[in-house]
């Protein structure tokens, strides 16, 4: 489920954030500490993380580093006090999505959360598409992969037959099977599909 994960050790701020996001139609779940979030975290979680930079025990930046180690791809928005801006800027350089200073503007924060959720949804969609393409490629035989590579190189069936030392009719059969397994109707569509895959890698 795509939600905003709110992590702050201040009860009032957590409640205010949840209410604000609910007013904008955004579902959320709150944790009172970084440790509590880590205990519940799993790689299938989707959405974004709104994270206070200063908390008791494990701090926001410490949790952020742990998320990086775990391969978490959810966008992370830091909530910072004025004195914490350098810490937040450093986190941005390390891949955090954004930081917002307290006291925050409600609309600005909600807008950034919505932006982060949209980006996470796009990443998930791209990953699913890439996995689908990889699954189709895995169905190809080694000979079909050879034929596909030569088709993508723009070579005609006769040239492919000569290079692979097989009959042209055999090339046509392999070519048809490649198109069928990859879910395309032409060499152009096949090339577009695999170019799209390369961009998501």
Image (cartoon, rainbow, N blue to C red):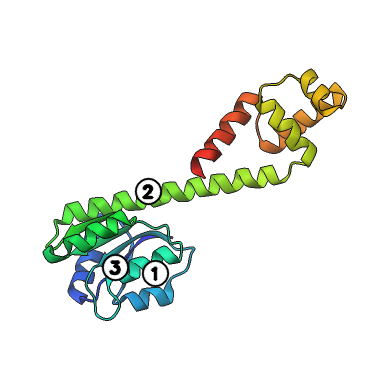
- Crowding around mark 2 (Cα neighbors within 10 Å: few <14, some 14 to 19, many 20+) is some
| Residue name at image x 88 percent, y 24 percent | 167
Q: Quadrant of the N terminus?
A: bottom left
Residue 198 at x, y = what percent? Answer: 54, 39
Of badges 1 and 2, nearer the viewer stands: 1
Residue 84 pos. (x, y %): 17, 65
Could you tell me if residue 23 is visible in this image? no
Q: How many marks?
A: 3
Contact check, label 1 and label 2, Cβ < 8 Å: no
* Mark 1: few/some/many CA within 10 Å (<14, 14-19, 20+): some
User: Residue at (65%, 31%) from the top-left corner?
Assistant: 184
Q: Which residue is mark 2?
A: 119
Residue 145 seen in this snapshot:
yes
Marks 3/1: CA–CA distance: 9 Å
Where residue 157 sits, quadrant-wise, is top right
Which comes sooner in the sequence, label 3 or label 1?
A: 3
Q: Is residue 82 left or right of residue 11?
A: left
Within the image, what quadrant is residue 94 found in? bottom left
**Relative height, residue 120 to residue 49 (above, below):** above
**Residue at the disc numbered 3:** 61
Name the foreground residue: 25 vs 145.
Answer: 145
* 82 relative position to 200: left or right: left
Instruction: Judge left or right: residue 180 versus residue 162.
Output: left
Kind of element beneath mark 2: helix
Q: Residue at x 18, y 52 (%)?
A: 108
Q: Residues within 10 Å of mark 3 (few under 14, many from 20)?
A: many
Please provide percent x and percent y for residue 182: 67, 37
- Foreground disc of the pair 2, 3: 3
Kindly identify which residue carries mark 1. 66
């Amino acid at each position: 489920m795509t939600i905003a994960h709110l992590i702050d050790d201040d009860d009032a701020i957590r409640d205010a954030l949840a209410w604000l996001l609910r007013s904008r139609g955004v579902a959320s779940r709150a944790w009172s500490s970084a440790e509590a979030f880590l205990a519940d975290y799993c790689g299938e979680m989707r959405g974004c993380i709104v994270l206070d930079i200063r908390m008791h025990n494990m701090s926001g930046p410490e949790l952020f580093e742990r998320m990086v180690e775990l391969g978490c791809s959810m966008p992370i928005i830091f909530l910072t006090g004025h004195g914490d801006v350098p810490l937040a800027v450093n986190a941005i350089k390390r891949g955090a999505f954004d930081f917002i200073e307290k006291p925050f503007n409600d609309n600005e924060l909600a807008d950034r959360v919505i932006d982060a959720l949209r980006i996470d949804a796009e990443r998930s969609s791209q990953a699913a598409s890439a996995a689908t393409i990889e699954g189709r490629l895995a169905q190809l035989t080694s000979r079909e992969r050879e034929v596909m590579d030569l088709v993508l190189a723009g070579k005609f069936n006769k040239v492919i037959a000569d290079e692979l030392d097989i009959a042209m009719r055999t090339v046509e059969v392999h070519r048809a099977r490649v198109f069928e397994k990859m879910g395309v109707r032409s060499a152009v569509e096949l090339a577009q599909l695999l170019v799209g895959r390369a961009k998501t890698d």
